[in-house]
Amino acid sequence: MSSAPSGSKFLRLGVNIDHVATIRNARGGRHPDPLRAAHLAVEAGADGITAHLREDRRHISDSDIARLKSELTRPLNLEMAATPEMLAIALRHVPNACCLVPERREERTTEGGLDVVRGGEPLARIVGSLRDAGIRVSLFIEADERAIEASAKVGADIVELHTGQYCERALEDNAAGIAREVERLRRAAVLADEAGLEVHAGHGLTYNTVVAVARMPQIVELNIGHFLIGEAIFGGMHSAIRHMRSLMDQARAGPHRSQAPQ
C-alpha cells in the first residue's frame, strides 16, 4: 500500500471491478473472474474494492459479493439501490460500506446522484438499518448544497460526489465548463466536510481528470472502475492502477488547490 504524502490526508483509491464481470457475462462461464481482479487490484495499490450489485444482475452477481466478502484483504464497498432486496443482501454479507446509488434498468451506467432531498423517511430507514449493522453508509450525490444537507440529515457517514459532469466537460475540451465543474466539486467537498461527512468522489475519472479532484484536501477516497479496467486490457491491472495511484499521490503531495486538467 502507498504511504501518505507528508502534510496531508492520505487519499484512498477504491477500484470498481464491475466491468470484469461484464466481460465474463458476455460469454458466460467463470472467466475473467472479478475476485481475481480484486486481488490484483489490491496487490497494485488499491485501498478497497467496490462492486455494484444491480437489481438486474447485469455484471456483478450475488455469488461474486459472497466471494469478495469472504476472501478480500481490503474493505468491500457494496454499491446498491436503496431497496428492501438490496438491504437484505447487505445485512446478510455485512460489507465494510454500502454506497446507495440511483438505479434505472435502462441506463448503461449510473447517470446522476441519488435524490436524497426527496428520499425522506424510507431512505432514512435504510440508512439506519445499515448503520445499526455496523456498515458505513455512503450516498452518491450531485455536488449540491441541498443534497449535502439532506445526506447529513438522514444519517449518512459519507457522501460520494458525482464527478461525471466534470469528466464530460473534459471530454469536450470545454475550458469554461471544466473550471465551473471543478469549482462546484470543490465547494461541495468543503461543505460536506464542514457538515461532518466523510467525502469521496467518483464516476468517469481518468488519468487526465483525476489530478484536479485529487488536489481537493477534503476528499479522502476516489472510486474508479471502468477506465482502469479498460486500461488494464492494454497494459495490465498492475500498470493501470499503479499509474493512477502515482497521479493521486503526486496531486495530494502538492499544493492544496484545485486545477483543471492540462
Image (cartoon, grey):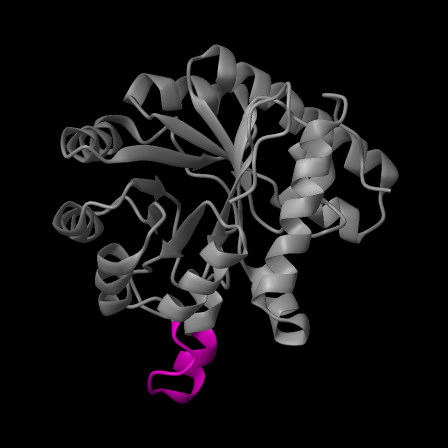
Q: Nearer the viewer, residue 61 or 42?
A: 42
Give the image location of residue 58, x and y in percent: 37, 70
Give the image location of residue 210, x and y in percent: 69, 43
| Residue at (65% x, 50% y) in the render | 244
| Residue at (22% x, 68% y) in the render | 63
Instruction: Please determine whether, in this image, residue 191 is positioned above or below residue 213.
Output: above
Q: Is residue 6 left or right of residue 86?
A: right
Residue 14 visible here: yes
| Residue at (31% x, 48% y) in the render | 81
Give the image location of residue 226, x and y in percent: 56, 61
Location of residue 7 by image quarter: top right
Whether 95 is among the magenta residues is no
What stretch of residues is rendered in magenta? 22-33
Q: Is residue 35 left or right of residue 163?
A: left
Residue 227 visible here: no
Q: Nearer the viewer, residue 234 or 161?
A: 234
The quadrant of the rendering that contains the C terminus is top right
Instruction: Please determine whether, in this image, residue 208 is positioned above or below residue 196.
Output: below
Location of residue 33 by image quarter: bottom left
Q: Is residue 142 left or right of residue 106?
A: right
| Residue at (18% x, 30% y) in the render | 125
Instruction: Please determine whether, in this image, residue 144 is positioned above or below residue 205.
Output: above
Whether 23 is among the magenta residues is yes
Q: Is residue 34 left or right of residue 164?
A: left
